[in-house]
Image: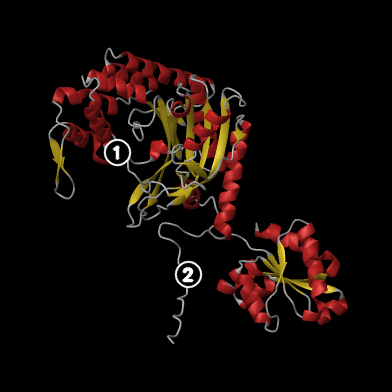
Amino acid sequence: MAKPKKQPRPKAVTPKGFRDYFGQEVSQRTEMLRTIADVYHRYGFDALESSAVETVEALGKFLPDVDRPNEGVFAWQEFDDGGNGDWMALRYDLTAPLARVYAQHRNDLPTPYRRYAMGPVWRNEKPGPGRYRQFYQCDADTVGTASMAADAEICAMLSDTLETVGIPRGDYLVRVNNRKVLNGVLEAMGLGEDVAARDNVLRTIDKFDKVGEAGVRELLTKGRLDASGAFIDGVGLSDDQAEPVIAFLTSKAADTAGTLANLRAAVGDSKIGVDGIAELEQIGSLLDAGGYGADRIEIDPSVVRGLGYYTGPVYEAELTFEIFDEKGRKRQFGSVSGGGRYDDLVKRFTGQEVPATGVSIGVDRLLAALREKGRIAAQATGPVVVTVMDRDRMADYQAMVAELRNAGIRAEVYLGNPKNFGNQLKYADKRNSPIAVIEGGDEKANGIVQIKDLILGAKIAESATLEEWKERPSQFEVPRGELVAKVREILDSQD
């Protein structure tokens, strides 16, 4: 009889494109989400937590035109008892679920409906450095009003949010543009309803931040050589046709009035272009009235990311301070948030145009920015560790921990093998604990406890002489009844 084949053990590896988050990272993200939610709530937005799973039909705007929707999203087919199968998918972002929720519950929701949502989204895309298939988004949207006041409010709220989480004024800029202005430029180029040509121009405009004015001009006309020496075919426009696009992308002036004047020249007689400029003018006036100057929010026609998706104003928050990349080169940190007006998304469900505008913050990128600025500690402080000198007196140690916790101090009892005291201190070091509490038999008999300042002790051990040890003690002996007060005193000194 053949010997049964041994089942191989599963490999303990994270799936490709995903990662695990440990205590400090989770705590930092939770705190950031709470801070952002406070700002959104102050602006009158209500929380919404929608399902992580949507039907493929609801997410259809983001899926490729293939029989099996397994590109771009994580999808599967769910069969009923009759053998009929519906496609389900993990949400790709937080905007498509909002469109479904509003269409489904619009009769019960106020108009306009102001909501914020926070949570993970999943994209079945090729992962890369810093690019994961699961990541957090933090969105705020207003559905049901075409007023430019909603767009101005989103920009103001984005500015306030960045400053509240720790990005100081001068280290960020919220930049605003309008898809209607670009549509006016396309009309001025004479492209009319030539969808293919318009799409080619849009794709070229999206490369402006990479290839600059000269590169876009070449790509719109005869083509260009890229950095590798390969030739990229151009769209085939004439120089005259390309000129309105260049005028649009380079129309930013020293002030808002100058920028708007340049945009008017770029769109010519196009009605939709003129309407878009009027909307930008309204947004600018509303922001000025609220005290949001050009040092925080500015009209900038070079904001082109995602213009094909939006129907009106678009905005992007960019962090302007410099960091060093993996090759040691200086560069700006870049975008951490983007959004705009999308008046067609709910229409997919209702058949009627429902105006909407919103913004999405990349939480992981914003956290990375705060770490770069030193606004978040590189290592989180762990709990106070109560060591165990006598395993038969565990109740005494648990009583100490309870007192500390009841006083709002994070604390734990060492639960490993207490035989080797050195291992207990090594454990406390690994936990980045600020304090160790020690009560042996002699201390118990004398009604005292030893409190060891582990942070100060580590610093002294690194550089101090013997005399400095004497002048700056890192271990204190206090009456048992003063445990909480002394621990709090040491924690305050460490802060």
Q: Give SS at disc 2.
A: loop
Percent across and percent down for residue 88 are 47, 45
**Quarter holding residue 276:** top left
Q: Which mark is residue 209?
A: 1
Can you give x and y, in whole percent of width and height, for residue 230 in the image? 14, 47
Q: Are marks 1 and 2 in contact (CB under 8 Å)?
A: no
Closest to the observer, 159 or 236: 236
Question: Quadrant where the N terminus lies?
Answer: bottom left
Q: How many marks?
A: 2
Q: Residues within 10 Å of mark 1 (few under 14, many from 20)?
A: some
Q: CA distance from mark 1 to mark 2?
A: 41 Å
Disc 1 marks which amino acid? Asp
Front-most of residues 85 and 160: 85
- Give the residue furthest to the bottom: 1
The disc placed on residue 12 is 2
For residue 210, which quarter of the picture? Answer: top left
**Residue visible at 82% across and 67% down in the picture:** 399
Identify the amino acid type marked 2: Ala
Q: Is residue 348 among what the camera can see? A: yes
